[in-house]
Image (cartoon, rainbow, N blue to C red):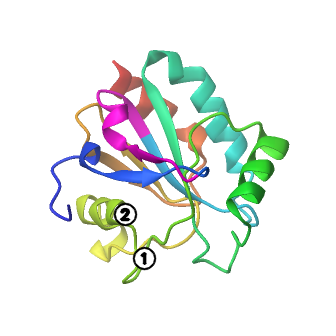
């Protein structure tokens, strides 16, 4: 799986524990984001939801992957994460079970994403919560954006990929 050709070859568990093949999203434009409920960037959930509602009907998905590796900012259970996302941001896009994005226990999807677009200085590590990977309809990484990039700034790139 580490040498996968596209994102569609991976699967991950949703917050409710159900596994989901990312092949389910074949042919769609994806924004993959590692998230956290107690982070300075957490308000980006609102911008992610806005993008999702704006473009979902055209073939766009946001896939959120909660992570507790940065300052222990996602300590809650799956139920707590789901309740937080719903109560505070009305999140309607898929939120997956908490994963690691760096280190030996990093989810295979994130190992692949970091190889596809290593980021600053080619280091590959995810620097913090809300690092974003934009995936084209072919299932390959088109661009990577740091935590400080507001998701709303990706509208032009998303529209171009949606064609």
Q: Foreground residue, 90 or 22?
A: 22
Residue placed furthest toward the right:
87
- Of labels 2 and 1, earlier in sequence is 1
Q: Which image quarter is the C terminus in?
A: top left
Q: Which residue is rendered at x = 36% and y = 28% of the image?
A: 28
* Residue that badge 1 annotates: 102
**Where is residue 42 drawn, in percent x and y?**
72, 57
- Up/down of 60 relative to 125, above or below: above
Q: Foreground residue, 82 or 72?
A: 82
Q: Is residue 143 left or right of residue 9?
A: right
Label of residue 57 in the image: none
Circles 2 and 1 in contact, beta carbons < 8 Å = yes
Q: Secondary structure at mark 2?
A: helix
* Residue 74 located within the stretch drawn in magenta: no
Q: Secondary structure at mark 1?
A: loop
- Region in magenta: 17-30
- Up/down of 44 relative to 114, above or below: above
Label of residue 110 in the image: 2
Residue placed furthest toward the front:
18
Q: Quadrant of residue 86?
A: top right
Could you give the CA–CA distance between mark 2 and mark 1, rounded to whole angstroms?
8 Å
**Where is residue 93 drawn, in percent x and y?**
59, 36
Residue placed furthest toward the bottom:
104
- Total numbered labels placed on residues in the image: 2
Q: Which image quarter is the N terminus in?
A: bottom left
- Up/down of 139 relative to 67, above or below: above
**Where is residue 143 drawn, in percent x and y?**
34, 48
């Amino acid at each position: 799986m580490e040498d996968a050709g596209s994102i569609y070859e991976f699967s991950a568990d949703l917050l409710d524990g159900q596994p989901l093949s990312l092949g389910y999203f074949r042919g769609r434009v994806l924004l993959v984001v590692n998230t956290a409920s107690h982070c300075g960037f957490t308000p980006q959930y609102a911008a992610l939801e806005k993008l999702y509602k704006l473009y979902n009907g055209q073939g766009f998905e946001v896939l959120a992957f909660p992570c507790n590796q940065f300052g222990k900012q996602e300590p809650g259970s799956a139920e707590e994460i789901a309740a937080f996302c719903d109560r505070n941001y009305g999140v309607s896009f898929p939120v997956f079970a908490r994963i690691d994005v760096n280190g030996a226990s990093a989810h295979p999807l994130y190992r692949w994403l970091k190889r596809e677009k290593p980021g600053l200085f080619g280091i590959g590590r995810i620097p913090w919560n809300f690092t974003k990977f934009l995936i084209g309809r072919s299932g390959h990484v088109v661009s990577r954006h740091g935590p400080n990039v507001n998701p709303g700034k990706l509208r032009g790139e998303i529209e171009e990929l949606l064609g």
